[in-house]
Amino acid sequence: MESSRFSFSLECAPELVSVKAFSDAAKVFEQMLDAAQASDWRMADARLASIDFAASPVVEDDNSRESAEVLDRITSLASTDLHSSEDVEDFQGIIDRMTHIVSRTGSTLKLGIGEHEGSFSPEVVSGLQDEVRAITIKAARRSFGHVNGVVDKIILQPTHRSLGLVDRVTDQRIEVRFGHELDADVKALTPGTEVDVRGFVRSPEGLGKPSEIDAEDIAPVENRHHPLVTAKDLEGILAMDLPAGVDSVSIIRDLRDGAIKKEQHQ
């Protein structure tokens, strides 16, 4: 992508540029930059005859390029017939706001990032809203739960964050998706770490597809392994004069959990 300049143009007649329309457009523009973690980009242009905005990064670096990739995904929503459910879910709020302002003004919204452009006509945003509704209905069928498994894959990129898990109970693979707010937790993990993941679990729609979970919490599982009791540990406690109501099984159990010391029963 040669340039990270992001443009936003609502091609409406000047008489339709009310304060409300301008405010709504500015909110959509801001929301797009927030989604791309580009809220620190500076205004590069603004015109009121229609409603035009543009923003550019202060510095062209890896962070600005990553933000541009997200903005490119948003722009691509206009030019793709088949959208990934991930894109529609990630940008649902933006799609709702775009639909509102395009429907309110009856105008076409044009986005551009670098040399890539996308036009959101009333027909395009209507189709996107249909996809949002379908995903919302599907999401209502998800169940909140948790999965305990071993990490075997970690992907931590601005546009793709996921963990691969092997379920401890079923040995099945599970794809874990998470937001940037869990980056710090995931960075502390390594392949082979056992974790407990809580979030919305989705069952696969086809054979051979892994289950998915949209994580709200990812936490490593502490090692609860207790070493087996040895003959040395039992030395001096298996006597015939055990206290009333106490048997050797309960003593061994308490000894294993560290609740008592051998001296108490010697």
Image (cartoon, rainbow, N blue to C red):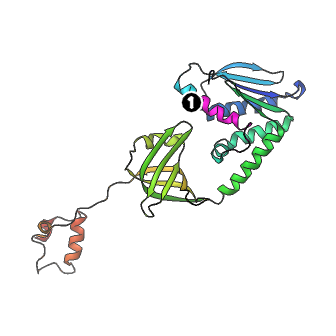
Percent across and percent down for residue 36 are: 61, 33
**In the image, is 49 to the left or to the right of 112?**
right
Q: Residue at x 78, y 40 (%)?
A: 99
Percent across and percent down for residue 216 are: 53, 50
- Mark 1 closeness class: few <14, some 14–19, many ≥20 residues within 10 Å: some
Q: Residue at x 56, y 30 (%)?
A: 66
Query: Magenta residues, as a range?
Result: 67-83
Residue 38 visible to an observer of this rendering:
no
Q: In the displayed image of the protein, which residue is found farthest to the front?
A: 208
Image quadrant in which the C terminus is located: bottom left
**Residue corresponding to mark 1:** 66
**In the image, is 119 to the left or to the right of 199?**
right
User: In the picture, residue 39 is in which quadrant?
Assistant: top right
Asked if the magenta segment contains residue 72, the reply would be yes
Q: Residue at x 63, y 43 (%)?
A: 90
Q: Nearer the viewer, residue 105 or 169?
A: 169
Percent across and percent down for residue 44 are: 68, 18
Image quadrant in which the N terminus is located: top right
